[in-house]
Image (cartoon, rainbow, N blue to C red):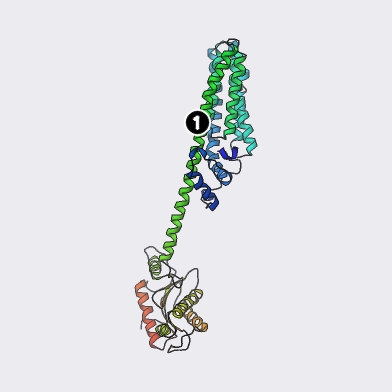
Amino acid sequence: MELQESAIYAGPPIASPEVRSQPLRPAVMAEVERLLGGRTRDIRLKGELGRLFEERSWSRTAKIIRAWMIWVTLLDVLTLGLNAILLPNAVALSMLPPACILPPAALATAFIWRKPRGVGLQRVSLVAGLFLILLSVALVGVSAGGEFYERHLNIMLFVAITAIIIFSIPLAWTVAVAFFALALYLIFQLRNPMLDTGSAVAGTLFFTSGIVATVVARRTMTILAQKTFLLELRDKRRVAELADANARLERLAKTDPLTGIANRRWMMETLNRLWGAGAERPAGTAMLMCDIDDFKSLNDRLGHAEGDRCLVKVAGIIQSSVRRNRDHVARYGGEEFLVVLPGADVQAAPATAERIRASVEAASLPNPASRVAPYVTLSIGVAAQGAAGEIIGPERLQNQADTALYLAKKAGRNRVVLFRPE
């Protein structure tokens, strides 16, 4: 029962918002949907859902309990001071001993609820603290007698009702507080010399109906809070699913579906970012334009399936031949690949291009229709800007790489050519 209805967390507090945002297990989300699909009054949080609700509620509940305890203490001290001023000394002195029970009980409870502790200690401290507070209020009236007797018993019930309403605690704890309040009221009313037994019982039954209604209202508030919590979990799950779907769509929009590497759109965005206003580019940037030699002949001779396999293999070789944490590779056209090498100068860029070309050649992918060799080869045009030279825009650098690629093709293919302005 207490796990189902608890708004108290007995374990360590949540470390950070990131912890709360961790995805829930499918079984837990299925339970959320089941509870939200049923009647609100049947909501019971068990297991992991109960624990999560307790984690979410503990801080707020503890803050309310501490504030209530402190204010009750202040009001008790203030009342004692006013009684000492306004009432006869004999009456004020009779109220003092029982009134002194309240402050230590309330402050001790507030101290215990400063941080999460064991559920047993929390339960005992709160229920015992409230019992001592109610007993103190009742004994003040009993000790003073006369008109104060009935008045303080009613004040005691009022104190119990406020605690029941504002404390979001398990139903069993709430029922315990209500029972203690009514039991104290009945016991002291039976001892009231101004009332007979029938009047004491009738008055207790009257107040019992009001406290029962208060307990039911508190229970309804707890159920509604739990339903709100379930709705938040479902909304967070749906938002996370939507964000994940959008991220997948974004990745698909920027990924070449055949080779799995970046596509032309992604490369354009990367170039804009590298050359954007305020972008801090490494000194020197190079581009490699790579083209598979006689790729059309490969498709015609071996078929498009073998051509696709060739593209996938070549893309993987290029990707594995560059610096993964700095360089950028994209399929730029049918059989063309564009490589951007930030921080690569006129010595490093041709070396990287030669490594790519040699790796493709060493793979010995079949291309019997090639005019260069019976296997797949690669022609690469290289364009690089020096560290101390003028900043060349991406379009111009790409045009230079295209020009160098054209020269590589013209010179016999399967080679690397560096663009030189002269």
Instruction: For residue 254, say whether it is visible.
Output: yes
- The location of residue 64, given as percent across then percent down, is 53, 33
Residue identifier under label 1? 217
Task: Say if 293 sits above or below 252 in the image.
Answer: below
Q: Choose between 163 and 382: the one closer to the eye.
A: 163
Kind of residue sitting beneath label 1: Ala
Numbered-mark total: 1
Quadrant containing the N terminus is top right
Q: Residues within 10 Å of mark 1 (few under 14, many from 20)?
A: some
Q: 275 or 143, which lies in front?
A: 143
On screen, residue 386 versus residue 115, left or right, reads left
Q: Looking at the picture, how far across and down is residue 169, in whole percent?
A: 56, 35
The image quadrant of residue 185 is top right
Q: Residue at x 63, y 32 (%)?
A: 125
Quarter holding residue 393:
bottom left
Image quarter (top left, top right, bottom left or bottom right) of the C terminus: bottom left
**Where residue 246 sits: x, y (%)?**
42, 59
Extreme residue in the front direction: 38
Residue 153 x %, y %: 56, 18
Q: Is residue 359 above or below residue 89?
A: below
Residue sitting nearer the eye, 323 or 276: 323
Label 1: state its secondary structure: helix
Is residue 347 visible in this depiction of the protein? no
